[in-house]
Image (cartoon, helix red, strand yellow):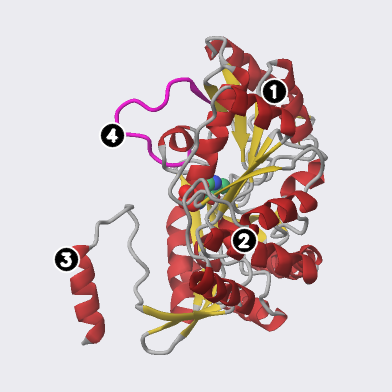
C-alpha cells in the first residue's frame, strides 16, 4: 500500500533525530487546529505543530505574507535592509515595555539563544551561563549547553561554565516550610551553590518563564523578581526565552509581564513565525551599544530576511488586531476548567498547571505519593491519537510525566471541548 511504501522509504532514507518513534500517520494536509492523514482522517492538533503554529495551520494572514513576499522580496544580502525588517522591529518594540527596543531577526530558537548568550558574554566580559536543571533552549553549542532537560552525553565537552540550579516546582518542592513550597530558601541555596562553582565569570541566567519541555512548570509568583535581584547582585544579565510563551499564548503578550520583571535580553522564536522559522533577540540600548562597541558579530544567511520578517509582521499584526491576549486568556480558562473537571474524575491526574493556552497535566500512579505514571502517559497519548487528538508527553526520570497542550489561539470552543472529550476517553481506556 501507499503507507507501507512511505514508511519503507522513510526508514531507508531518513536520519532519526531522536529516540522517539514518529507518529504512525502520513500527514497530508493541515488547516486551522487540525491535521489530516492520508485517509482523510482529521486529528486535532493540541501542540500547534511543534508548539509553533500560534494562529493555526495556514492562517490566511501568514499565507498572504508568504506569497506576497516570496514573489516580490524573497531574500537579501545580510547587509541590505528592507521595510518588513524595520517594521517588525518597531512593531515588536511597541508590544514591549521600555527599555526593550533593539531587535535582531534570525530564524530559529536555538540560534536566537546563541545570539543572546554571545551578547551577554560580550556585555559582561564573563562566560558562565546559569540555567534551570529542566531547561530547554536549543541544540546548538551555547543554547545546548544551557539545556539540561535532554541528554548531553556523547558529544564531548559542552561550553565551559554552564551551571544548573534546581527548577522551582510547587508540585514537587525541594524545600518546604509549614507545608508550603519554600522557593526563597531554594533560590538562596541554589545561588550559594552557583557562587561556589563559579570561577568569577558569571555572564547570564537564561530561563523560560514557564518551563515547557521541562514539564510545564511555572515558577511561583515573585520568583523572577527575586532571580533578577540575584543576577543584578552578581552583574549577570537575565535572558528570558519566550519561544513558546511569547506573543499572547499565556494570556499576556509576554509571560514575563505577570511578574513585573523586564529581562535584559528577550528571545522569541516558535510563536513569532507561527509555524515558519522566524526568531528575534530583543534587548535595550545599553546592551546593544556596548556589544556593538566590542565587535558583536552574529551574521547568518537569514539574518534580517525580508520573507521571515514579513511573516513575523503578519503574526504580530494579527495578534494585535484580534486581541489575542484576551482570547488566549478566555480559551485557556475553558481548557483549564475542563482539565480540572477531568482531574475530579481521574485519579491519575495529580496536577493541572500552566497559563492561558499552555497547559499540562501531570500523571501519577498515586496522588498521595506522587509517583510518576510514565507508562500511563505514553498509553494516554497513543489512545488520544487513535481517537483523533495529538498532544505531547514530556517526562524525565524521577521528575514526572506530563501531558502538554498548547493548541492554536484560533481554536474554537467546540474543538477544545472535543479534545477534552477525547482525553477523557483516553484516560479511561489507558488506565484500565
Ligand atoms: N527555547 C525553547 C523554550 C524551546 O521550547 C525550544 C524548542 N523546543 C527552543 C528554544 C529551540 O528552538 P529551535 O528548535 O527553533 O532551535
Determine whether the residue tagged by mark 3 lies in a helix, strand or loop. Answer: helix
Name the image quarter holding residue 421: bottom right
Examine the residues drawn in magenta and state their main secondary structure. Answer: loop
Determine whether the residue tagged by mark 4 lies in a helix, strand or loop. Answer: loop
Give the answer, above or below, for where 89 lies relative to 122: below
Mark pair 2, 1: CA separation = 31 Å
Q: Are marks 4 and 3 in contact (CB under 8 Å)?
A: no
Mark pair 4, 3: CA separation = 25 Å
The residue singled out by tag 1 in the image is 231
Q: Earlier in the sequence, mark 4 or mark 3?
A: 3
Q: Which mark is residue 12?
A: 3
Q: Earlier in the sequence, mark 2 or mark 1?
A: 1
Q: Nearer the viewer, residue 366 or 129?
A: 129
Give the answer, above or below, for where 86 lies relative to 195: below
Q: Nearer the viewer, mark 3 or mark 2?
A: 2
Q: Earlier in the sequence, mark 1 or mark 4?
A: 4
Q: Are marks 2 and 1 in contact (CB under 8 Å)?
A: no
- Please give the range of residues in magenta: 148-163
Q: Nearer the viewer, mark 1 or mark 4?
A: 1
**Residue 96 location in percent, x, y?**
78, 48
Q: Is residue 400 visible?
A: no
The residue singled out by tag 4 in the image is 154
Residue 151 is inside the magenta segment: yes
The residue singled out by tag 2 in the image is 312
Report the residue at 68% width, 17% height from top. Answer: 235
Report the residue at 61% width, 68% height from top. Answer: 407
Q: Is mark 2 within 8 Å of ligand 1?
A: no
- Is 288 left or right of 52, judged from the image as shown? right
Amino acid at each position: 500500500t501507499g503507507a507501507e511504501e512511505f514508511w519503507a522509504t522513510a526508514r531507508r532514507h531518513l536520519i532519526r533525530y531522536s529516540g522517539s518513534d514518529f507518529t504512525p500517520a502520513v500527514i497530508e494536509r493541515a488547516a486551522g487546529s487540525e491535521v489530516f492523514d492520508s485517509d482523510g482522517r482529521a486529528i486535532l492538533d493540541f501542540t500547534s505543530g511543534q508548539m509553533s503554529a500560534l494562529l493555526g495551520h495556514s492562517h490566511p494572514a501568514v499565507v498572504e505574507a508568504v506569497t506576497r513576499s516570496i514573489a516580490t522580496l524573497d531574500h537579501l544580502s545580510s547587509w541590505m535592509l528592507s521595510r518588513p525588517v524595520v517594521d517588525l522591529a518597531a512593531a515588536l518594540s511597541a508590544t514591549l515595555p521600555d527599555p526593550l527596543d533593539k531587535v535582531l531577526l534570525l530564524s530559529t530558537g536555538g540560534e536566537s539563544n546563541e545570539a543572546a548568550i554571545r551578547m551577554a558574554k560580550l556585555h559582561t566580559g564573563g562566560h558562565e551561563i546559569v540555567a534551570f536543571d529542566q531547561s530547554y533552549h536549543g541544540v546548538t553549542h551555547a543554547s545546548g549547553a544551557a539545556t539540561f532537560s535532554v541528554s548531553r552525553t556523547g558529544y564531548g565537552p559542552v561550553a565551559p561554565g554552564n551551571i544548573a540550579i534546581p527548577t522551582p516546582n510547587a508540585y514537587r518542592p525541594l524545600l518546604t516550610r509549614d507545608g508550603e513550597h519554600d522557593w526563597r530558601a531554594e533560590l538562596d541555596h541554589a545561588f550559594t551553590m552557583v557562587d561556589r562553582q563559579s570561577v568569577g565569570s558569571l555572564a547570564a541566567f537564561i530561563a523560560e518563564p514557564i518551563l515547557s519541555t521541562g514539564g510545564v512548570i511555572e515558577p511561583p509568583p515573585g520568583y523572577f523578581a527575586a532571580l533578577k535581584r540575584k543576577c543584578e547582585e552578581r552583574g549577570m544579565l537575565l535572558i528570558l526565552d519566550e519561544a513558546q510563551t511569547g506573543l499572547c499564548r499565556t494570556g499576556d503578550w509576554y509571560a514575563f509581564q505577570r511578574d513585573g520583571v523586564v529581562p535584559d535580553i528577550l528571545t522569541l522564536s516558535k510563536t513569532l513565525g507561527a509555524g515558519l522559522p522566524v526568531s528575534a533577540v530583543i534587548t535595550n540600548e545599553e546592551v546593544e551599544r556596548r556589544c556593538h562597541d566590542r565587535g558583536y558579530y552574529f551574521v547568518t544567511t537569514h539574518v534580517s530576511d525580508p520573507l521571515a520578517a514579513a511573516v513575523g509582521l503578519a503574526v504580530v499584526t494579527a495578534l494585535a488586531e484580534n486581541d489575542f491576549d484576551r482570547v488566549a486568556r478566555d480559551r485557556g480558562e475553558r481548557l483549564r476548567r475542563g482539565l480540572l473537571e477531568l482531574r475530579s474524575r481521574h485519579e491519575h491526574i495529580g496536577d493541572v498547571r500552566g497559563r492561558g493556552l499552555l497547559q499540562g497535566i501531570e500523571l501519577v500512579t498515586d496522588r498521595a505519593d506522587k509517583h510518576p505514571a510514565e507508562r500511563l502517559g505514553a498509553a494516554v497519548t497513543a489512545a488520544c491519537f487513535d481517537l483523533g487528538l495529538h498532544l505531547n508527553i514530556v517526562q524525565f526520570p524521577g521528575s514526572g510525566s506530563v501531558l502538554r497542550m498548547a493548541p492554536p489561539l484560533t481554536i474554537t470552543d467546540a474543538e477544545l471541548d472535543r479534545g477534552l472529550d477525547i482525553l477523557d476517553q483516553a484516560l479511561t481506556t489507558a488506565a484500565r
